[in-house]
Amino acid sequence: MPATIIVGAQWGDEGKGKATDMLADTTDLVVRYQGGNNAGHTVIVGDQVFKLHLIPSGILYPNVTPVIADGVVVDPKVMLEELDGLQARGLDAFGRVKVSGNAHLIMPYHRELDLLTERRLGKNNLGTTKRGIGPAYADKASRVGLRFQDLFDEKIFRQKLEAVLVHKNEQLAKIYNRLPMDLEEIAREYLGYAERLRPLLSDTTDLIHRELEAGKHIILEGAQGTLLDLDHGTYPFVTSSNPVAGGALTGAGLGPTHVDRVIAITKAYVTRVGTGPFPTELFDDIGERMTDVGGEYGTTTGRRRRVGWFDAVLARYANRVNGFTDIFLTKLDVLSGFETLKIATGYRYQGEVYRHFPPHQSIFHHAEPVYEDFPGWGSDISEVERYEDLPQEARDYVDAIEEASDAPVTWVSIGPARAQTLIRRDVPLVPGV
Ligand code: GDP
Ligand code: IMO
Ligand code: MG
């Protein structure tokens, strides 16, 4: 059976955790393909709240195998803490989670260098999550990274660490005036994790392909979002991996022909955490209210998220670079009670109007949105049970998002719980279920 990719269409935190969890009841594997514990995916089941950083959101279904594939960067300490937390809540996390031996490790010097680089940039900082993500991916590209499989081979682990630590310590001492890191201390800590993590080590590419050949269904769960993509996002204010659909293929070891659905997770407005341009950002009372009603505070760092109106230019762009087959629209409930809603349909820059994502960064940085207005709806919609029962204005707004994005809206989320999801088009991921 072909695989489904779930991808953030904006700057992350679109509700990928909720969407993955909601769609995972008929799937067999949920695979994280990129990013690391910079992600924070919230899943709410009954009165239980799960904030997942590394473990795929499918963990909550006992019949789903959660997989961390090659393209992910793994901080083993964080992973153990998360696994222990889930285990303590009654889930067999250690028994089910599979981790690729090719996934790169986040090392203590990655976290330290993330922190120091950001500090050095001063007011030009990127606002990273300071989890060591950028430095770990940089080492992967420089071919000096350590991988998950190295934890289980002390000789190789020490050899690689020794070679790389010389350079890291030079950097720490000469550029940042820091004390060197101790090889023995790092080796002891990391090799100490091996015993508990060994059962998770897996050839995940082989696993994924065997499952597909056996007719099983797979969800590839993206982290971050399209506009944070290293190649296609708002560089340099991006993360260091490829959240876009193409990244799912390289990250999990699949070809394009293995996938038949690419689901965009998109909020009914836009948020961003960290620095970087954001044309439709709101600085007024309306923005204040969106933040408060939407609970827009980061799942990983607790930072207040910046908020703004839905941006159709970015939505169309995201569709282009991902090839969406569906939209899973989230947080429509947050817009209840606003008299007028706005959607940016273009950008004005130096007398010209751009309808497509501008090719030059300066245009985007100084873009002035051109808005279309839509009437809001007064009533609370979070308890509505059928799409048809939404107020006409809400359905018109969803139609507008669909038209602007040029992809069909299949699901509309009206609250964080599983059940608060309305089906607008009946096209199940697994036919017949
Ligand atoms: P992710 O990183 O894409 O998984 O998103 P986060 O979990 O970081 O942030 C999304 C937040 O919105 C979480 O607190 C979710 O519980 C919440 N959420 C998801 N969908 C909805 C929705 O439709 N309405 C409301 N009000 N909250 C939602
Ligand atoms: P989820 O999966 C929102 C942002 C950071 C910063 C930039 C680079 O929960 O949607 P990094 O630590 O990755 O080097 O930071 O990317 N960022 C996210 N923003 N949601 C996320 O993940 C993010 N992961 C990273 O705020 O601007
Ligand atoms: Mg998040």
Image (cartoon, rainbow, N blue to C red):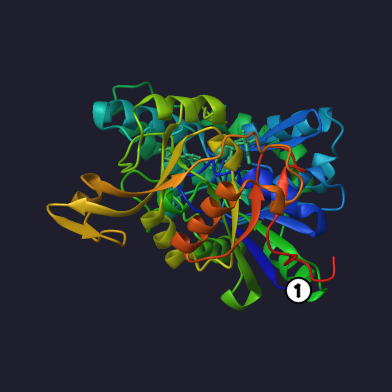
Circle 1 Cα neighbour tier, 10 Å, few/some/many (<14 / 14–19 / ≥20): some
Please give left or right for residue 115 compared with residue 197 in the image. left
Q: Secondary structure at mark 1?
A: loop
Dot 1 corresponds to which residue? Answer: 1
Q: Quadrant of residue 262?
A: bottom right
Q: From this view, report whether residue 199 is shown above or below residue 249.
A: above
Relative height, residue 37 to residue 406 (above, below):
above
Say which of 293 and 372 sits in front: 372
Q: Nearer the viewer, residue 381 or 86?
A: 381
The front one of 66 and 378 is: 378
Residue 261 position in % (x across, y down): 63, 68
Q: Can residue 151 be seen from the camera position used here?
A: no
* Percent of width and height locating residue 366: 20, 45
For badge 1, the amino acid type reads: Met
User: Where residue 385 appears, x then y in whole percent?
Assistant: 77, 46
Residue 43 vs 399, above or below: the answer is: above
* Residue under the image location 33 percent in, 42 percent down: 278
Q: Which image quarter is the C terminus in? A: bottom right
Residue at point 49%, 56% (across, down): 401
Q: Nearer the viewer, residue 281 or 42?
A: 281
Quarter of the picture holding the N terminus:
bottom right
Horizontal placement of 219 versus 224: left or right?
A: right
Give the image quarter of residue 427.
bottom right
